[in-house]
Image (spheres, grey):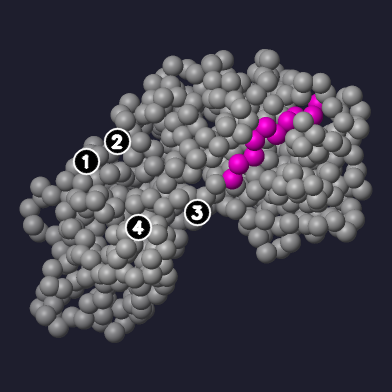
Amino acid sequence: MISPATEDTIVRVPIVDYLVLDPEPHLRAHECVACRARYFDRRNACANCSGAEFAEVDVPTTGVLSTYTIVSFAPPGVDAPFVAAIVDCQGTSVRGKLLNVTPTPDNVALGMPLRLATYSLGADRNGVVAIGYGFDPADRKDMSGE
Amino acid sequence: MSDDVWILGIHMTRFGKHPGKDVVDLASESVLGALADAGVSMTDIDVIGAGNLMGASSGIGQQVQKQVGQTGIPVYNVVNACATGATALRVAYLEIKAGESDMGLAFGVEKLAGAGLLAGGSGTADGDQWAPQGRLGAVTGLEGHTGTSSMPGVFAQIGLDYAHRYGGADFELFARIAEKNHAHSTLNPLAAHQKPMSAAQIMADVMVAYPNTRPMCSANVDGAAAAVLVSGERLKKLSAEQRRRAVKISASVLTSDPWQESCQVLPDVSTLTKAAARKAYEIAGVGPGDLNLVELHDCFATAELVHYDNLMLCEEGGAADFFNSGATWRDGGTPVNVSGGLESKGHPIAATGIANIWEVATHLRGEAGPRQIDGARVGLTHVIGIGQACAIHILERSAA
């Protein structure tokens, strides 16, 4: 969807605000200063301790597959089937989908090592490209990303 | 025992497709059935708890009053996802416990036949303009991008998480759980589906979210259920026949989910179920081993396995072995979902939390016909509303 020749000038926007694209793609959580509970969505106060002060923390980009499902149906514009997953990123649980994996049970193993990767959702009418994230098998050669 | 609360009458409609009836028709049918079963009329009722999830703002309680009797009593319209019916019943229970009412009515109703996948979220039409919205700053619908929020997918992950942690469960085992429930419903004339399905047929059916195929998912159907509750004090003044058929509510418990690290990204249906179960067993003074039958929230086959453990029907981590022992079949030691469960009887959301009580009560009264669990004295019902709410009721046969 993106022409390599124009990649330098493309304006990119992350699919969610907890995906940070630069300098290297990673996820960022709101961490409760008092109890260290982490949240990806905006919180008014901590669901664990009611603390109202949060700090931004970077989430490790590697983890292991906690659980998954292979969803057969998806909204228009989303490829199906897709592998939806919960990834344990060194103590922080993350929702995502597996990238670069054939979506059959044979190709997915609970506990498999994974690493964060990104993909393009395409450009809007202003030419802004949305970037999504997912997880690649960690043993896959580094050829993912947009 | 005068402060106990009893079920005096209870009724459920046939679950399935009711194209000629609206929610008010179905609810009224269940209410009139429960009143007749109780041997009382609307003039005896002091309070109504009413539930209809899809019409949450419609005031279903008052709508039904206009069909069955407007007597000026308080009406509580409640919503608690799939625990809506159980919550409505608990409202009537609490009014009686509090001494505000002697007799209460609760009902739940839903029209869901033909509904597609629930709560999957939607992708926006891509490409117009990416604009961050909401608490995640999302520029598009997230279903299929950051995993899944679809119910079959969420509960598939919950089941595989359990399988990952304890082993012993695979696609085939989950399919055999659905096989059991589809076998059980062949004896239930009110079930939406009454045809047996083999595990092989179930595995070969349409895959919805691995490992849940279509017959391993709760069936979206129409239906209603209603119950009349009465105080022990008032029950004493009723007929011998009413006292004999009354079913004691030995525990009524409602929980929500406490904070857990992982529940931020995947609903944790276990912690709040375990908490509710512990409390219910303690209040009722019974243990899992005392249960003659259990109706638990098998919204998906993957959920049923996890709840064997959460309700402490088996040892921690032992749900697969427990199922493989045959314990949860109707001829086993702890029959589970002899009605056919949500997978086969069907799941008209707000009706489910009263329909499961109807099922257990009917066995405790010895009125379950060909599917009667002989000698049933104690039973447990469980529902989970995602978001979340868990309701557990423990019911006991009348000693009268």
Q: On the picture, is B283 further left or further right than B148?
A: right
- Dot placed on the residue nearer the N-terminal end, 3 or 4: 4
Q: On the picture, is B199 further left or further right than B55?
A: left
Q: Looking at the picture, how far across and down is residue B133, in whole percent? A: 40, 75
On residue A111, which mark appears?
A: 1
Q: Looking at the picture, how far across and down is residue B79, in whole percent? A: 63, 55
| Mark 4 lies on residue | B144
| Disc 2 residue type (three-letter) | His
Identify the subunit bearing mark 1: A
Identify the subunit bearing mark 3: B
**Main SS of residues in magenta:** strand
Identify the subunit bearing mark 4: B
- Image quadrant containing the C terminus of chain B: top right
User: What residue sits 11% from the left and 80% below the top?
Assistant: A8
Q: Is residue B183 visible?
A: no
Identify the subunit bearing mark 2: B
- Image quadrant containing the N terminus of chain B: top right
On residue B164, which mark appears?
A: 2
Which of the two discs, 1 and 3, sits closer to the camera? 3
User: What residue sits 27% from the left and 39% below the top?
Assistant: A105
Q: CA distance from mark 4 to mark 2?
A: 23 Å
Mark 2 touches mark 1? (CB < 8 Å): yes
Which of the two discs, 1 and 4, sits closer to the camera? 1
| Disc 1 residue type (three-letter) | Gly
| Mark 3 lies on residue | B387
Q: Looking at the picture, how far across and down is residue A93, in whole percent? A: 29, 53
Mark 1 touches mark 4? (CB < 8 Å): no
Q: In this rendering, is residue B242 above or below A98? A: above
Helix, strand or loop at mark 3: loop
Q: CA distance from mark 2 to mark 3?
A: 24 Å
